[in-house]
Amino acid sequence: MTAKLPYRSQAVAKPYFIAALLLFVGQILFGLVMGLQYIVGDFLFPAIPFNVARMVHTNLLIVWLLFGFMGSAYYLVPEEAETELYSPKLALVLFWVFLVAGALTVVGYLTVPYAKLAELTGNELLQTMGREFLEQPLPTKLGIVAVALGFLFNITMTLLKGRKTSISLVLHLGLWGLALLFLFAFVNPHNLVRDKMYWWFVVHLWVEGVWELILGALLAFVLIKTTGVDREVIDKWLYVIIAFALMTGILGTGHHFYFIGLPGYWHWIGSVFSALEPIPFFMMTVFAFNMVQRRRRDHPNQAAVLWAVGTSVMGFLGAGLWGFIHTLSSVNYYTHGTQITAAHGHLAFYGAYVLVVIAMISYAMPILRGRIANSRKAQSVEMWSFWLMTISMGVMVLALTGAGILQVWLQRVADNPTPFMATQTQLNLFYWIRLWGGVGFLAGLVTYLCSFFIGGTVEQEATAGAGGNARAVPARRA
């Protein structure tokens, strides 16, 4: 069943999606390097020290998700606005600027000692380096701002000249919030308490604030297109979900303020509103299943539906349930910075953001390639990749959770606490399980990439199965 892009300029999303997936592979490879280094401490040392592998792993996560968000916006906004993108050429120029800047930054991490890299890139002019997730040199940070401003200009001008919908408005609010909050990355005060507070303004208010708006908009778009449910119904769900997400996400930042020197009332604010943070994710799960049950069409791209429903379920488990496990201040006192934190972080990012980007790619990429959906065989392989990645992530998270519980017991609760390195030795079995979970996840990702190279269309298969008498019925456009 062939498909034509509603608006030609949507094609600029394709290179963003391809770059996102390739960078995703790089992120997982460096994650496996780190997993081995937990067990074999001198693996690849001194070529790739643990701190460098960790920087590359986390930075690639952020960059490839940003590529995915940008590609999704370039595909979604013209269709929602019912007009061509304001400047496809600007979108392509920004793509190459962002890709080259990101690649050079990773090369810098791998080839130049970090202190020397800071010296070479003018960190003494404005000291912004050295903080987790914000390790990027000053020129890279400035480049990110320039790319973000160009990107926002492009999609905002597109929105202004076309139709305004709830989905595009929520998406714009999330993307503008993402860009504005990143400006705190340039604020690096000498006071450690203020430094950590501003740092959490970026890290927490991204992933537990404005990114949730992006998540909600992308999920709503995919569900509208694949289920045919009335837009008014989805809009009502979307507004309620983002209202709860903003309320709990903004005040829930307090759970990062427990022990960094801020007033004690943050223990109560952080505990109460963080305990409420699972609510929008639970609502998102109910929303996704409700929309699928009320669907008015059986879209041929069932793989995209699986990724969308998986987003809501795994997002609730990772960001909601696993976050709630250690979000109360009295519990966080013992668990903060342990492998329980790592378990929550891995499952939350996978469930909430990795899956929604893949859901968007799964829906849009076949159309970008001239078909409404991939062949059933390709979709079958794609669904296998979903289960491989999801089960493998589950293995990793359960292993990290077990490691975290044992770590808390040995290192922080016992009458005679075990030293840190001795504790790590006791966790070796969990680290082996986590490593094999990572290998399984990489296998699932490779399986997903292989699905792109399986030919055929749904229409061809239907025709062949019916002896040439089947006729494809075009889906109604939402």
Image: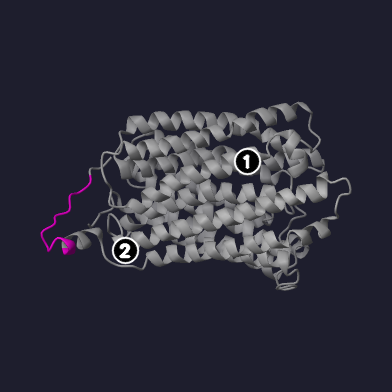
Q: Is residue 232 above or below residue 433?
A: above
Q: Is residue 362 magenta?
A: no
Q: Residue at image x 61%, y 52%?
A: 397
Q: Mostly what secondary structure, the magenta segment?
A: loop
Residue type at mark 2: give it. Lys
Say left or right for 273 vs 310.
right
What is the quadrant of residue 118 in the picture?
A: bottom right
Residue 73 appears in the figure: no
Answer yes or no: is residue 354 visible: yes
Return the x and y of residue 60 as percentages of the image width and height: 59, 58
Residue at the image point whose x is 33% and y is 33% from the top: 231
Q: Quadrant of the N terminus?
A: bottom left
The residue labelled by disc 1 is 323
Label 2: which residue?
Answer: 377
Whether 379 is drawn above or below 197: the answer is below
Q: In the rendered view, does 441 fall on the left or right side of 452? A: right
Rendered location of residue 455, percent (x, y): 30, 67
| Rendered location of residue 325, percent (x, y) | 65, 39
Q: Position of residue 433 (x, y in %)?
A: 63, 61
**Spatial separation of the CA atoms under disc 2 and disc 1:** 37 Å
Residue at image position (14%, 55%) is 471
Q: Is residue 467 magenta?
A: yes
